[in-house]
Image (cartoon, coloured by chain):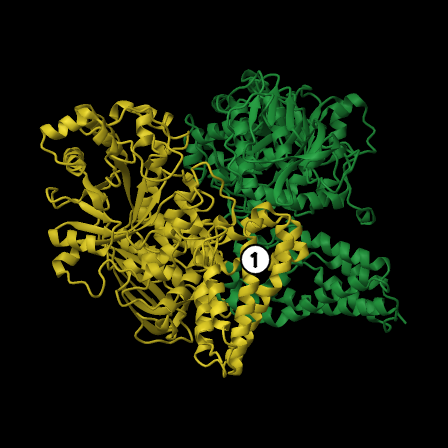
Chain colours: A yellow, B green
Amino acid sequence: MASAKTPVQNPASAQPSPSVFVNTLMPQPAHLTEQPGALVITPSFTTVEGHFHDARLDHAVTRALNRLKERTGLLIANLPADSASATLTVDVDGPGEAIQSDDENESYSLDVTPSGAHLHAATDIGAMHGLETLLQLVQPDGEQFILPAVSIQDAPRFRWRGLMIDCGRHFIPFPVLLRTLDAMAAVKMNVFHWHLTEDQGFRIESKLFPKLTEDGSDGLFYTQDQARELVAYARDRGIRVVPEFDMPGHTGSWLVGYPDLAGGPGPFHIERRFGVFDPVMDPTRDSTYKFIDAFIGEMAAIFPDPYMHIGGDENNGVEWKQNPRIQTFMHDHNLKDTAALQNYFNQKLLQILKKHDKRMVGWDEILTPDLPKDIVVQSWRGFDSLAAGAKQGYSGILSAGYYLDHMDSAEDHYLVDPIPAKSDLTADQQARILGGEACMWAEYVNGDVVDSRIWPRTAAIAERLWSPQGVNNVDDMYRRLAAESIRLESFGLTHLSQEKIGLRRLAGPSSEEAGDMNALRTFVSVLQPPDFSGIASEHRTTLSPFSALTFVLPPDPPSRHDFEHLVADYLQDPVAAEAGQTQLTGIFDAWIAAEPDLLRMMANSPILARTRPRAEQLARLGTLGSEAVSYLSSGQPAPQGWKARQLALLDQAGRLQCGVRFTVLQPLRDLVNSVQER
Amino acid sequence: MASAKTPVQNPASAQPSPSVFVNTLMPQPAHLTEQPGALVITPSFTTVEGHFHDARLDHAVTRALNRLKERTGLLIANLPADSASATLTVDVDGPGEAIQSDDENESYSLDVTPSGAHLHAATDIGAMHGLETLLQLVQPDGEQFILPAVSIQDAPRFRWRGLMIDCGRHFIPFPVLLRTLDAMAAVKMNVFHWHLTEDQGFRIESKLFPKLTEDGSDGLFYTQDQARELVAYARDRGIRVVPEFDMPGHTGSWLVGYPDLAGGPGPFHIERRFGVFDPVMDPTRDSTYKFIDAFIGEMAAIFPDPYMHIGGDENNGVEWKQNPRIQTFMHDHNLKDTAALQNYFNQKLLQILKKHDKRMVGWDEILTPDLPKDIVVQSWRGFDSLAAGAKQGYSGILSAGYYLDHMDSAEDHYLVDPIPAKSDLTADQQARILGGEACMWAEYVNGDVVDSRIWPRTAAIAERLWSPQGVNNVDDMYRRLAAESIRLESFGLTHLSQEKIGLRRLAGPSSEEAGDMNALRTFVSVLQPPDFSGIASEHRTTLSPFSALTFVLPPDPPSRHDFEHLVADYLQDPVAAEAGQTQLTGIFDAWIAAEPDLLRMMANSPILARTRPRAEQLARLGTLGSEAVSYLSSGQPAPQGWKARQLALLDQAGRLQCGVRFTVLQPLRDLVNSVQER
């Protein structure tokens, strides 16, 4: 955390004039120059588009003006104006690609002066990115809102900046997806990877094969009309939609209605558990490919993107090994193992995709030497796997390090770079690293909690994929993330509000009066969900409720980073740091004081009661912290054995328990380790 | 407020055993008897339906079990059971009406014993009401959840318990309507009155007359598929959908695409202002009725309810008077004024509705003696108008007193009874008062704020319409409303979360650290939106933003009632009330202390800054309160002139200003008036 202590700075700024400009841009632009002065936003703000405009650009400008209106509270009537008099001119050279690809020109420039703002872009897409930047520039200045004078030239570092949402394991309601697209556009992401099929559910209507959803979805699926609506909504925001139909494994839900596709005998059912399961397609029959061909053709008509994702991950090969007919086939075709058979399947699948004009994307497992170079590998295994592919000539996108379900910090994700500084890839090889995708796997999310699992952490990943490699100051990222997090709420996202809603539900109406809410707030301020394996250890199924405190807590709450800083700053000179001592002591006292209120509340809140051991530990951690600060600030040593006892307590508090984990253990450990013993 | 001081009680309970049963039912059932003991909810909770069941009942039971699961955090697998062993048996005699009418039997009985729960109802609808009651009965008991043992026989007092939402003046997004239906079902409301057309927007797709939405909606309308989905969603929850197509006035948006319908020359435009406007249909032409006939026929195929609402309100007659052809028509047909002409129009409209098997509902204005007795009058004028209609033989529903946009308190609405205790109506006449409807007119709401304008206040109206007349203890209502308000959040309603979201937006990310959020919370705890005319005085249009503090604040916050109580309790014996003195002094000190923080925050928050005078007034009100308590508690008189100065300050604070009003002025006035002067 040493690097985190450098002062907040604007990495892209050449002429800082902090008295005016508070840079909360996220992602940071490639080049930004501050100018003196600012453009004041008034109700007479007007906009004109240049010689080119189309419906998509008109929509984008209208949406931006509406957001500007809500942001400033001004009734901006946007009366007609000409380019000489307009407050904002939006000059776009042309519409962009008829079907947005990963080659689309996304660059833009934005110049704000005290007399007006000028946005220029090659395409609608660049203009939309520029409008998002403009909206992020809006800041209060006394009793008015301004756009600080800046000159920005901006373009993304990576062309593929994606978010995958697994809508298979848990169905995510359609409106949640739409607001997610709004938020993606706000942080300049451009690929929505829609994971539509899983053992636990088949989520897209097929008119050719209606039993896919009739028998495989529990009635929870998207209609084709909705899919088309989503694709149009995304296109209107500069976002491509890459659908994923995971094959040949993870297909349990397909097989319920169409058991003839299966490599095993069945019967099949919608899977309720999580993990890797045996059901798999039969790659030996022509009828399988005939089915896939028809299905892919149907989907290709709905999803215009040049790419289609075929999954290809985690086929355990069990059913293939157990099926004598498949074993004979493998023998006859000289396929030495199930991996070879899957490669055979992929080759056939590739031909089907080509027939429907689609390029193949798949997970690491699809990468075998005899696949052509125009496939794209999505790496859940990591850099090395990605780099190895690039060296062989394959394009790739990174997802290892961007798994949102792992409940890592924004900082952890932020510092994962698809092309690390120390990479030995050549320029050509580097160009094959298209970008990355945040992955929201849905074992442990549903529509009620998914926003807080995706946001705001995904904005940090979006910056990693857009901004120059040198933009990597963690403190500055967290400062801007806090601002962006609040801005994102305007799309209806519940990532910030959900916690309080959950606490109200768990604590009941009387807790507000009784002051119990304060104790509960203190409690949750030091907690976050356990990591993926921690939640998995509770043996949840798709039918499990989402009411435990685990699901109420946001991962990586701002308080985690704040506390870490407070302790690090204090430890620089504990004897002199009086303010730090006071603040820390206040925090530790609050932890101790919360215990009786928490225990009383938990005595009549069955769900909260499951976290009682954590409430007791918190009070003990408060004592630990209080004693540590007392020794450190006084410069007095602790009695022998004190540190060992405290470290044992920290070890105990660090154990997986109660479905929640502390965010404060490492800083507390630093405090304890700084104390001298007699 | 004297009656509000009686202790909290369970009005329907015969054998209170408060050590177990915390009655938070809303609405209160007609008859409730507490029994000893409770049914403990465990993961092995099972349900069986009796000899009758259908898809609607299955859905309702499944939804209820899922909510029980989320409420308790238990993985209730609902394994197969028989009626002897099941935890909950749901016995329903039959499916209910093929098309739900206002004659539907909605009664149910629910018996909970320590060994199981038994729900019986004549129809699906009664069963659904019973399931909502069962879910409201769930309460924590130590570390488990229980259903207290009770015996409930329940049926509604009124058969028509509606909520109208005006989707014309502002479009309300479809998902908001769906969650509103969930909430309506939770409080046993049974009519969703969908106000679909207004001068400001035509909101329902017509395939026969596509220009209605193409030219009249700004692209903001519901598709016919959505309308069908909403009707099915509502039916699945025991809710009828009564669509309203307001005619002949309020039709400006119709006339943009179809000016031939108009009684005036045009040109027509989508209205952006609010009020009563001139555009009106031409009632003299056959082509008008041909259009209406075709349109009503199209809508009748989408909306199966026996009733259709034709509005009929606020036609100012201006265009009829200005049109020579219409004047000639009136003369030729011996129609002495525009009211007579509107009656002529209504007669023709009535024939069209009859042709399509629809009964007519309209606002007060439609009531003229020559209309048949099977129409229903919705009264915005009040009891007297409603009672007059009933005496003439007309059925009616009350909406005066239930206008949510007036920003009255839940208490105000709660104490409005469609048949007041002092009513002189005969039993037959009383039977014509079908019930009431809460009305959410949408001049000053959009999809972001509408939840907090509807909920939780509408739950108090729902109780008025369902529960026996004698259930009218305001304190007990507020206590249960607080519990229901939290329960309603589970449907995704934002009525509680929206305030904090808005404050974050207005205050920015740094305010949380700076502690400014506490000052802001103190500030908003004593504020609410002004009444309808107060907001209207700001001359808003449909294009105005919703970002002012006005729209962030909930009407009638719980703090209003709490403070009123605190003061009333204290004033019973100020010298002895030490706890009350301490509490009040603490509150007043917080008001005073908040001022510098608020002013600093407002200096860099342009939207909040508009309320600066209120922040200054709050500090002065704090001083007022502090001095009053000091005189009262010490028993010392105030110097001469003190009261006059304080009352002047209260008058000033009571003036319309800044788009927000204080909730605390009357209790403060009571304090001041209780002080003796020298």
What residue is disc 1 on? A615
In this rendered view, identify the residue nearer to me: B315 or B112.
Answer: B112
Give residue B618's quadrant in the image. bottom right
In this rendered view, identify the residue nearer to me: A284 or A74.
Answer: A284
From where the camera sits, is residue A447 visible? Answer: yes
Residue B550, position in %: x, y? 59, 55
From where the camera sits, is residue B336 visible? Answer: no
Q: Chain of mark 1?
A: A
In this rendered view, identify the residue nearer to me: A596 or A368.
Answer: A596
Residue A544, position in %: x, y? 47, 39
- Quick check: A443 above or below A113? above
Residue lying at 36% horizontally and 32% vertically, measured from the top left: A223
- Quick check: A34 above or below A196? below
- Quick check: A185 above or below B348? below
The local secondary structure at tag 1 comes to helix
Residue B101, position in %: x, y? 61, 21
Kind of residue indicated by mark 1:
Ala
In this view, the residue farthest toward the right is B678
Residue A475, position in %: x, y? 39, 68
Decide if residue A214 is on the left or right side of residue B301: left
Pointer 1 local density, CA inside 10 Å: few below 14, some 14–19, many at least 20: many
Decide if residue A492 is on the left or right side of residue A594: left
Q: In the rendered picture of this protein, how many numbered marks are placed on residues? A: 1
In this view, the residue farthest toward the front is A640
